[in-house]
Image (tube, grey):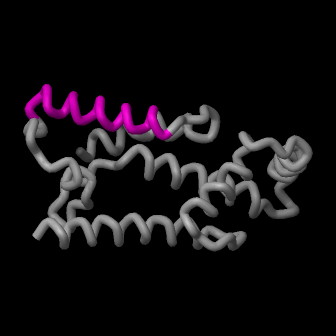
Amino acid sequence: MEAINSLAVPVIDYSFGIIEWTQEELRKLDTKTRKCLTLFKMLHPRADVIRLYLPRRIWGRGLRNMKDAHDIAILRMGKYINCASENDKVLTIIQQCLNESNTQKNIVNRAERLERNLGIENTHSYSNITAYKNKIKQTYVKINENLK
């Protein structure tokens, strides 16, 4: 799982801000990953799928979920561009271009829309990314408690 998380997932991570992935495509990617794991005898065909994505410290397998990785990457990029300092001229130019275009596909708008959908308060800092990670962690802990 560590090899997948450290070698395969970052390849897809780089495309998250450039290519607009749909939820269906991310779900299919997770399904293909599970099929490959089953094919190579790393996952039993009837194994619990939720446990595969649980963190290792709560007895999961620790595989990264593509939807969560996508959401975190979009939030990080949107906040990075939004929180650009006055000294960084390149980011200031990018900010101006994005403000002029103001389309739904620009990364800042996608990050803000994602924040609204997730119910995360819009602070112009990186704390909302941590809040989203904590929200995912709490969901996994609740699932783990229900499995007991």
> Residue 36 or 119: which is nearer the viewer?
119
Which of the 4 image quarters holds residue 106?
top right
Residue 124 image point, x, y percent: 72, 70
Which of the 4 image quarters holds residue 41?
top left
Residue 135 image point, x, y percent: 43, 69
Residue under the image location 34 percent in, 67 percent down: 139
Number of numbered discs on residues: 0
Tell me: residue 138, above or below residue 68. below
Q: Is residue 132 left or right of residue 60?
A: right
> Residue 100 or 14: which is nearer the viewer?
100
Residue under the image location 35 percent in, 43 percent down: 6
Q: Is residue 51 left or right of residue 114?
A: left
| Highlighted magenta segment, given as a residue range | 23-41
Which of the 4 image quarters holds residue 122?
bottom right
Tell me: residue 142, above or below residue 28. below
Residue under the image location 19 percent in, 58 percent down: 60
| Quadrant assignment for the C terminus | bottom left
- State the predominant SS element of the stretch in magenta: helix
Tell me: residue 74, above or below residue 44. below
| Quadrant assignment for the N terminus | top left
Does the stretch in magenta take in 28? yes
Residue 16 image point, x, y percent: 56, 39
Q: Is residue 65 left or right of residue 81?
A: left
Residue 26 image point, x, y percent: 43, 37
